[in-house]
Image: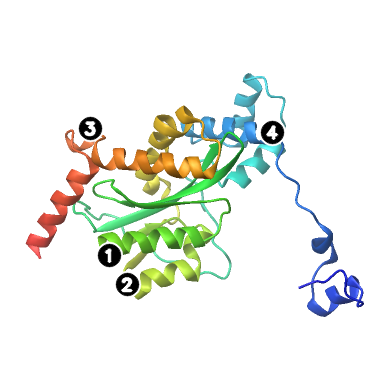
Amino acid sequence: MIDKKDALPVTRQCELLDLSRSGIYYKSVPLSAMDVELMRQIDEIHLLCPFYGSRNIRNELWGKGYKIGRDRVRRLMRRMGIEALYVKPRLSIPHSGHIKYPYLLRGLEITKANHVWATDITYIPMARGFCYLVAIMDWASRKVLAWRLSNTLDSAFCVDALEEAIAKFSCPEIFNTDQGSQFTAEVFTNVLRVNNIAISMDGKGRWMDNVFIERLWKSVKYEDIYLKGYASMAEVRNGLAIYFKFYNEKRWHNSFDKKTPNMVYFDTLVQKQAAA
């Protein structure tokens, strides 16, 4: 859009396009090796103590020998897309231009496949850098229906995962998310509306509604990511493909009387179809 080689001065080009000159000259600075290491440490602390805010995480880092200030911890937590989990007036602030949908799961008994799906995003550390993982989960069975990786926190990879889940497993009755901008974006909610899926979003004081996916993230990281120490997104992608196949097909869940997510999903799906 801005051509620095054009005869028209960059200042004038910015004025015509109503752009800030500082944004034109800014060059992004890659994360330092120390920041990458700190983000991994923050992620591990957050998994163990999700109720810790920046102050307590800073204290834990101090205990590990990292001399770091709270402001730096806050900045890295924002970059990772994580925050402390606790009841507070507003858990997440949606994009000002996005529609906020009501919470539909209060008092609802969820025992059948494809009744309710849910989603969330987590930070994935790598040996050199990091990326983000989104997963679509069937609430009743905990089956991971689809997932995607991205190096940016936008809506595109979330939409890709949602469309894959719908293509493979049909549509749920209700889709529940938090109020993150990736899920309130028109490009994401349009997919749900077009497929006549009721949209539910966690509201005030509903921090426990993502507990099943939070447990999934803990399993993914302790049973795969932290053990393997992947060096690149390609390695993470290949490793998670193997892990999620294991998780769905072979990993026993005590809450399901030693059944796998696939067993519960397809058993309750048959029951739902028979009842219909």
Reading the image, the residue beneath label 4 is: 33
Secondary element under disc 2, as helix, strand or loop, is loop
Residue at the far bottom in the pictured view: 16
The reply to whether discs 2 and 4 touch (Cβ–Cβ < 8 Å) is no
Q: Looking at the picture, which amino acid does disc 2 mark?
A: Asn
- Report how far apart the C-alphas of labels 4 and 3 lie in the structure: 39 Å
Q: Mark on residue 186?
A: none
Q: Looking at the picture, which amino acid does disc 3 mark?
A: Asn
Q: Position of residue 33 (x, y in %)?
A: 69, 33
- Which mark is first along the chain, 4 or 2? 4
Reading the image, the residue beneath label 1 is: 171
Reading the image, the residue beneath label 2 is: 195
Reading the image, the residue beneath label 3 is: 254
Q: Nearer the viewer, residue 41 or 160?
A: 160
Left or right: residue 87 compared with residue 168:
right
Q: Position of residue 262 (x, y in %)?
A: 22, 45
